[in-house]
Image: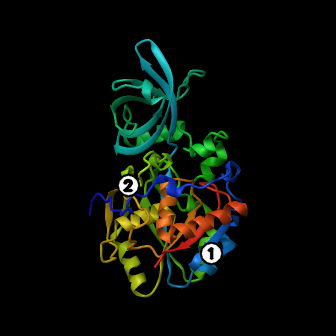
Amino acid sequence: MTRLAGRGLHAPAMQLSDFDFDLPEDRIALRPASPRDSARLLAVGEGARLRDLSVSDLPGELRAGDVLVLNDTRVIAARLKGLRHRGDSQVAVEATLHRRLSPHSWTAFMRPGKRLAVGDRIVFGQSSDRACLLGVLDATVKDKGEGGELTLSFDLSGPDLDAAIAERGAMPLPPYIATKRAHDAQDRSDYQTVYAQADGSVAAPTAGLHFTPDLLARLLAAGVETAFVTLHVGAGTFLPVKTEVVAEHRMHPERGEVEAATAARLNAARQAGGRIVCVGTTSLRLLESATDEEGVIGAFAGETAIFITPGYRFRAADGLMTNFHLPKSTLFMLVSAFAGLQTMRAAYRHAIATGYRFYSYGDASLLWRVA
């Protein structure tokens, strides 16, 4: 089934400032914990009861029959540097691929976007201070969208294009990391889950970065099942909310899939009394997009632009494991909808005061849905 999901309910006159808080810059992690499951885990219970754990304690927080839903998307090397050619002039540019449109075309966020026009030719793998030593990876700007996205049509297509991007691109670290240090070879593995399978994301499903083969084995031994869905995360996840009225913000669509067999397993687990625990906001958003008004999870293949804020009625997820998010972000809005705004304010105050690390390479929280 293919459908566009954009479901979401918003409290009247909800303001962006409702989701603001003070976050010291040194709380944003620049490297992940090692080993991965040694990261801290803040368990948030009823009445904002808080317990400081580690991710390795997760099996003890779940029970036999629960199902962890993980996003198996794989991050591609989606950040490309090159030169814009227009007549005799050249300008250095950088692209972050966002969403694939066809075997040869992508939407992308580009810097400096204002210096680019429809018809411009871009040679990637080449910069103003070094020659291009690799093969040809050229593209033409085909369109400029209102949201700042450009459409690039590459000369290569399909697997040839994929191979060229992988060879020449860099891991698209969030700007909160990339502005503080350069990416390196370690990020190629650090910014990828151990169970990643389906190429297509330009941002990692970061809650999943905490899992190790040993932790997955211990969860299985405890009777906790795992189910995999795929949501290809777009670069829009890095964009700030610019509208003061929350309801006026528009999410960028992202492509995902829930297989029919996976949906049937999840429905059966719930009927047997198991809880559905999403690992990351990406798997939660996809699962909610695939669930009908009666709470039945169905097969899904298509795009979702679902925007979840306080007032949303959750249909699929009972629990959520997620990293700590930035002020005024759509992700902090989502966790506030899931566990309650005041509960999350208290949890984040505790996390900041006790040294939890935030964002993509940071620590995690375990939340339960407000009844």
Camera-nearest residue between 322 and 298: 322
Residue 104 to residue 114: above or below = below
Q: Secondary structure at mark 2?
A: helix
Mark 2: amino acid:
Ala
Residue 319 lies, in percent from the top left, at 50, 74
Q: Secondary structure at mark 1?
A: helix
Question: Which numbered circle lies on residue 101?
Answer: none
Q: CA distance from mark 1 to mark 2?
A: 35 Å
Outermost residue to the top: 88
| Residue 234 seen in this snapshot | yes
Residue 288 to residue 185: above or below = below
Q: Earlier in the sequence, mark 1 or mark 2?
A: 1
On the image, which quarter does residue 263 sit in?
bottom left
On the image, which quarter does residue 151 sit in?
top left
Question: Which mark is in front, 1 or 2?
Answer: 2
Label total for image: 2
What residue did someone put label 1 on? Answer: 58
**Image point (58%, 64%), residue name:** 345
| Residue 253 seen in this snapshot | no
Camera-nearest residue between 4 and 255: 4
Residue 332 lies, in percent from the top left, at 52, 59
Outermost residue to the bottom: 272
**Image point (40%, 37%), residue name:** 148
On the image, which quarter does residue 102 sit in?
top left
| Badge 1: residue crowd in 10 Å (few <14, some 14–19, many ≥20) | some
